[in-house]
Image: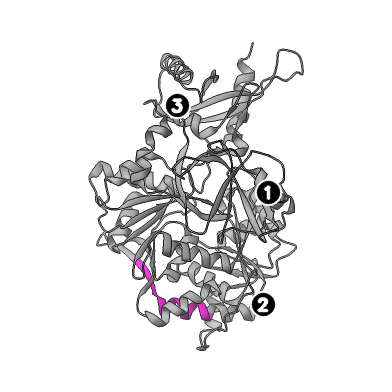
């Protein structure tokens, strides 16, 4: 079923129910204003936009870049594109200008719909110039040609008939979603309508979301599932690509103004809201659940946020990736019971696989695995690479055959595709999955293999430490032009700036801490960094590759 078909179905059942509300700046009376669409209004405007886009030539199979901020226009355009059968291409501005150019060249879009700022960047940087033939501006168009969304909608405003929504084939491409590239080159995950519908069903079934709920949606693509679930999407006034910089007052106001029952946010956003609200005794009593995704759970941060919630309300950290989401989740109450083990180097517990998802741990390999066999499985309790198969698993990357070969395993007997998550972890005796970091970021020395999360969580227990990052460094040897073996180096970001003598004391304390745990024993170099480079989307995933280059320079510069 076309993922957009949920919208007219819900509009027919509950035409006057709220579909989306977008927070605007405060009025003179000190209250926030919201632009709102009912389900019927959203369905009707998306039909009109679909008619207009089709007239322009944006039809079934037309790859269309959509660079529009979370807004009424974003919702209308996305549903219109799905209805026409066009293939929206979603790219994250936070991936950086260079990566954006590479991704858009790979996607080879024929149409570009964006705000003026996006079009200016497109013109100046030559994004997808060879393939583009249709341009639509959301806002004021300058000298770059094409038309505007206002003209498109006005030209179709007289058409009152329903748009003839396409009925997709089982594996027909519905959208291309580019990964953030926080741990590698961004890649375009190919989504089908079947995958989108499976995600909707999972949210309904596994998270217990009911029609009539209201969701504080801080991630645009998740917000699109609202109408399919009969849940209104409340969009706060924030930069969705920089959740760590969100104004907590606006987030809290949006929840309270619309009596939100659900909240979806990255760990960075939840930390901002939790720090602000817990310090002021604010309660978010209407929330039934808080869903977190995008990075491993930060237990102290979740504990702060819990003080703002009803006793029965849980935070649900969810495990998954752009290529497969959701895979597993755990309730905060159970998660808190695992905190001691996490602090002792066990990794982060991400819970049990959701219904329909087959999660297995295989032996670590950096090579392609063309075909599945049970001989790939790691021993029980052994840290290995996490793999998953199920209805929400994407089958390929767009125009990336080498990346597809590295990330996908074919199960010929079952006719299924298995996704290699790129994470390492293991199952405990209770059937819970523990995540130990990215496979590509493990540090392999001559003596042992260090995994990032188990090591870092041990050091993060130190009261002066904000966060740490383990990296592998190959320092220059004393011999001219020579290279040494890989060394495990701990990079540390402190809670606050300290004196030179305190740095020396803290280094000694952290090295002593390393020696008390089998997981961290052998780490002998500690470097202090003022502010870790992190991904813009989640403000939580540390760019360890950048830190490794910095650490290599530091180690080589200070080596005798």
Q: Tell me: 205 left or right of 283.
A: right
- Residue drawn 64% across and 10% down? 560
- Residue drawn 62% across and 21% down? 447
- Residue under numbered circle 2: 57
Q: Does dot 2 land on a helix, a strand or a loop?
A: loop
The mark found on residue 327 in the picture is none
Choose between 177 and 426: the one closer to the eye.
426
Query: Which numbered disc flags the more N-terminal residue, 3 or 2?
Result: 2
Question: Which residue in the rendered view is the most extreme toward the left?
Answer: 281
- Residue under numbered circle 1: 373
- Residue under numbered circle 3: 459
Q: Does dot 1 land on a helix, a strand or a loop?
A: loop
Q: In this view, does 406 lie above or below 136?
A: above
Q: In this view, does 57 lie above or below 338?
A: below
Choose between 381 and 71: the one closer to the eye.
381
Give the extent of the magenta segment. 34-48
Q: Is residue 144 above or below residue 501?
A: below
Choose between 454 and 22: the one closer to the eye.
454
Measured Cα–Cα span from mark 2 to mark 1: 46 Å
């Amino acid at each position: 079923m076309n993922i957009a078909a949920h919208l007219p179905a819900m509009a027919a059942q509950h035409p006057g129910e709220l579909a989306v509300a977008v927070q605007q700046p405060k009025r003179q009376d000190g209250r926030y204003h919201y632009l709102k669409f009912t389900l019927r209004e959203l369905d009707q405007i998306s039909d009109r936009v679909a008619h207009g886009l089709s007239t322009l030539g944006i039809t079934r199979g037309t790859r269309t870049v959509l660079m529009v901020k979370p807004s009424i226009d974003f919702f209308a355009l996305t549903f219109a594109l799905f209805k026409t059968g066009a293939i929206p291409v979603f790219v994250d501005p936070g991936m950086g200008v260079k990566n954006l150019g590479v991704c858009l060249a790979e996607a080879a879009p024929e149409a570009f719909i964006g705000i003026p700022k996006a079009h200016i960047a497109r013109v100046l940087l030559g994004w997808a110039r060879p393939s583009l033939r249709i341009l639509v501006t959301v806002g004021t168009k300058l000298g770059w040609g094409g038309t505007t969304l206002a003209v498109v909608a006005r030209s179709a405003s007289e058409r009152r008939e329903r748009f003839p929504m396409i009925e997709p084939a089982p594996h027909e491409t519905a959208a291309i979603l580019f990964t953030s590239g926080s741990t590698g080159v961004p890649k375009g995950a190919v989504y089908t309508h079947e995958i989108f519908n499976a995600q909707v069903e999972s949210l309904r079934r596994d998270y217990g979301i009911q029609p009539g709920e209201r969701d504080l949606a801080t991630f645009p693509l998740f917000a699109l599932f609202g109408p399919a679930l009969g849940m209104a999407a409340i969009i706060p006034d924030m930069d969705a690509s920089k959740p760590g910089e969100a104004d907590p007052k606006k987030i809290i106001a949006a929840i309270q103004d619309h009596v939100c029952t659900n909240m979806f946010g990255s760990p960075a956003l939840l930390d901002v809201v939790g720090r602000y609200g817990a310090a002021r005794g604010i309660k978010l009593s209407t929330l039934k659940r808080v869903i977190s995704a995008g990075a491993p759970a930060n237990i102290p941060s979740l504990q702060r946020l819990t003080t703002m919630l009803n006793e029965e309300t849980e935070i649900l950290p969810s495990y998954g990736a752009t290529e497969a989401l959701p895979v597993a989740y755990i309730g905060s109450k159970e998660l808190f019971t695992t905190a001691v083990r996490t602090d002792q180097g066990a990794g982060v517990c991400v819970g049990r696989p959701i219904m329909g998802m087959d999660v297995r741990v295989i032996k670590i390999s950096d090579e392609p695995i063309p075909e599945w066999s049970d001989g790939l499985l790691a021993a029980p309790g052994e840290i290995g690479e996490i793999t998953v198969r199920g209805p929400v698993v994407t089958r390929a990357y767009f125009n990336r055959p080498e990346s597809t070969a590295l990330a996908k395993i074919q199960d010929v007997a079952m006719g299924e595709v298995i996704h290699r998550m790129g994470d390492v972890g293991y199952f405990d005796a209770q059937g819970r999955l523990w995540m130990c970091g990215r496979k590509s970021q493990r540090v392999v020395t001559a003596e042992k293999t260090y995994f990032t999360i188990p090591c870092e969580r041990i050091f993060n227990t130190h009261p002066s430490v904000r966060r740490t990052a383990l990296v592998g460094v190959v320092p220059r040897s004393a011999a001219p032009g020579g290279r040494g073996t890989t060394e495990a180096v701990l990079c540390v970001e402190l809670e606050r700036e300290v004196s030179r003598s305190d740095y020396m004391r803290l280094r000694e304390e952290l090295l002593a801490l390393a020696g008390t745990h089998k997981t961290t024993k052998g780490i002998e170099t500690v470097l202090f960094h003022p502010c870790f480079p992190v991904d813009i989307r989640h403000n939580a995933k540390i760019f360890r590759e950048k830190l490794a280059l910095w650490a290599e320079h530091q180690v080589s510069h200070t080596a005798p």
